[in-house]
Amino acid sequence: MGRSFEQYQKRKLISSYFSVVLSIGLVLFLLGALGLLLLNTKKMADHFKEQITISLFLKDSAKEVEVDQLLKSLEVMEYTKLATYVSKEAAAEKHSEEIGENFLEFLGYNPLKNSIDIQLNADFVSPEQIEEIAAELSKKKHVDEVSYDKPLVGLLSENVKRISFWILVASAVFTFIAMLLINSSIRLSIYSKRFIIKTMQMVGATKTFIRRPFIWTNVKLGMLGAILALLGLGGVLYYLDQNFPEMDLFHDIPQLAILFGSVFVLGVLISWISTYMAAQRFLNLRTDELYY
């Protein structure tokens, strides 16, 4: 009978520890994922910004040598990420594929112009800067017309600012919620041992002596939860890197190391503080208050 009760208590204790580790792990995983999103917000924003293209339509009188010189001069500009020459034949072929029919047969001639497509560096993608760049490019000798999607540029810049702001707000709110959830899990775990705490106190044990094993146990659980969260984050990073290599998530290893280290330290720190506060609360209760 005594052995069965002992096994029951052991299973109950393991179940309690497992619950705390799982709660801490899930909360830290979500917090780490949000941190990962926050760190990569600029990178993702830059990726979308660099898809913006300025098209320079060239005059028919422009010679091949002059076009090559213009292309080379554009490639060395600080705002240029990539400059590509597109012949009117290639443009016609691409347009035919998009509309699903050969419009050259219908028209009898090619109305398109040779062009140079410029993809800009992300730092230069804003309505004001692109307007200045377009004005400068339109003055070049062999350029007939400069074209870009002006509404898209404005919409992209506005949305990037809005999303960045709300991610910061969400990060702050979620960090606070994470602390509450971890604190609640640890507090419930210590609540089940409140009578043991009071008994130890009544036989003369000091508060420090009583708190120490609870703090050490929950700090270890916090470490296990943090490791669980980091394994999950590592899996997510690997999956994203395999399926979206253009995001180059493993490019900045020190940044990832700081994020992973922060998640681990946060798990340990919150566990320590929550255990200290919960244990202190039950140490300060009167015996008759333990039943409420």
Image (cartoon, rainbow, N blue to C red):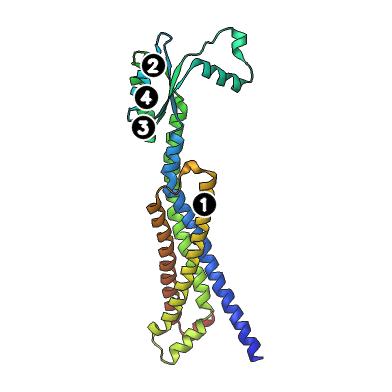
Task: Kindly identify the amino acid type of the residue bearing the numbered disc 3.
Answer: Phe
Task: Kindly identify the amino acid type of the residue bearing the numbered disc 2.
Answer: Val
Among numbered discs 2 and 4, the one appearing first in the sequence: 2
Q: Is residue 196 left or right of residue 259?
A: right
> Mark 3, mark 2: which one is toward the viewer?
2
Q: How far apart are the alpha carbons under marks 2 and 4?
A: 23 Å
Which secondary structure lies at badge 4? helix
> Mark 3, mark 4: which one is toward the viewer?
3
At 47% from the left edge and 64% from the top edge, which residue is drawn? 226
Query: Badge 1, how many Cα within 10 Å: few under 14, some, many 20+?
Result: some
Q: How many marks?
A: 4
According to the image, label 1 marks what residue?
A: 238
According to the image, label 4 marks what residue?
A: 131
Furthest residue in direction front, as rendered: 65
Residue 124 image label: 3
Q: Which quarter of the rendering shows the N terminus? A: bottom right
- Where 32 falls versus 94 (above or below)? below
Which secondary structure lies at badge 3? helix
Among numbered discs 4 and 1, the one appearing first in the sequence: 4
Task: Kindly identify the amino acid type of the residue bearing the numbered disc 4.
Answer: Glu
